[in-house]
Amino acid sequence: MIKVGVIGCGVIAPTHIEGYRRLPGVEVVHLSDLKPERMAEKGDKYGIGKRSQDYRELLADPEVQLVSVCTDHASHARIAVEALDAGKHVVCEKSLGRVQEDLDVMTAAAAKHPELVASGIFQHRFEPHNIRMKKLISDGAFGRILMVDLNFRCLRTNDYYLKDEWRGTQSGEGGGILINQAIHHLDQLRFLFGDVTAVSARTANMTHQGVIEVEDTAVFILEFERGFCGTVCATNSSAESWRSSLLFDGELAALDYVNESCEKVSAREPERAEMIRTALAGDRENSSVAGKSYYGSGHAAQLADVVEAIREKRAPGVTFADAANSSSLVMAVYESARNGGARTPVKIYR
Ligand SMILES: NC(=O)c1ccc[n+]([C@@H]2O[C@H](COP(=O)([O-])OP(=O)(O)OC[C@H]3O[C@@H](n4cnc5c(N)ncnc54)[C@H](O)[C@@H]3O)[C@@H](O)[C@H]2O)c1
């Protein structure tokens, strides 16, 4: 039996708790939250008896082998490093860290404890449609990739930001749309097309003046390690509640992938277009655990991967270094924007 502690009992916690409950031989036994009422609500709902306001008591619990870190961005590094030093396997929600130094200490702690599994959540990588797309690209179905274009719109109102004290602040969240919502799409770009080595960016607060300290809109150029470039436009001030559009061109075929569904395939040979269409057929899978629909179906699969990695004594599908690289891309965008759009290298963790 693998016994789990969940630190942070807010919005995302039920997605973790329900994900673990689906796995045979796994039990959530201990919860922690600074707010006792949140801990009580989740504890009562899921029948989890041990509850500690101080997460260090959970880390001192010898029964707990694996810890899910579901707190605000600013506390991830401290809690995850202390958990690894306490001999616990760790799963940490995105963004792995709030600032670059967080990523440095978290990846160093994971490297110091090769006997422990340390995984950063990027659940969309575990969704079948993304796995199918990655395979098509790496099998050469599109040919040599020429360019990539990501457009992501959503709406986060002032009320959303005022709901919790950490949201929209530099000290708690570390950024706005990029570090919170669009980070999933940036991770998808890295998953599909490989690492990004440099960026040139502009960011702005277009509609949340006086409410948030961070960006609600960002536009930037990406330089991929594999030699092609891409662009990103992202805003959470849109009249549209949620829309992602990933367009890319390879020498042999081009794809319009909208809201995680194949909208249009163009290819010089009709058979190739048909092959890609067939391979990507089917809508985005629905989630069977708690959470908003755009959280997707991947949490349960990623938690299953972590548990399997512990049992098989292997690295998880998304290591701390890998998850850190998506946060590091966000940090580089912020640095570039602070420097008037200067071309800025992305620090890569190996
Ligand atoms: N993967 C996804 O799709 C997804 C979706 C939503 C949120 N998230 C991530 O999950 C994390 C939490 O987000 P949320 O929306 O659940 O936030 P939230 O504010 O609803 O919940 C965070 C909880 O952590 C608690 N907390 C903070 N510091 C603590 C500490 N030191 N000890 C114990 N408890 C502490 C807070 O009291 C709060 O209840 C963030 O990193 C967020 O980006 C991921």
Image (cartoon, rainbow, N blue to C red):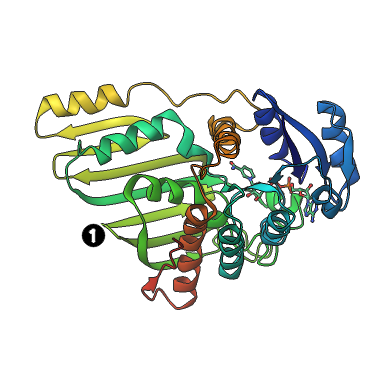
Which residue is label 1 attached to? Answer: 227
- Please provide percent x and percent y for residue 190: 39, 51
The quarter of the image holding the C terminus is: bottom left
Q: Taking the image as drawn, is residue 182 in sight?
A: no
- Please provide percent x and percent y for residue 274: 19, 23
Corner quadrant of residue 95: bottom right
Which amino acid, by three-letter code, is at mark 1? Answer: Gly
**Above or below: residue 68 compared with residue 86:** above
Q: Nearer the viewer, residue 212 or 3?
A: 3
**Above or below: residue 2 compared with residue 121:** above
Q: Is mark 1 within 8 Å of ligand 1?
A: no
At numbered mark 1, what does the secondary structure look like: helix, strand or loop?
A: loop
Q: Residue at x 68, y 52 (%)?
A: 158
Compared across the picture, whether 272 is left or right of 331 comes to left
Q: Residue at x 75, y 55 (%)?
A: 86
**Above or below: residue 324 compared with residue 279:** below
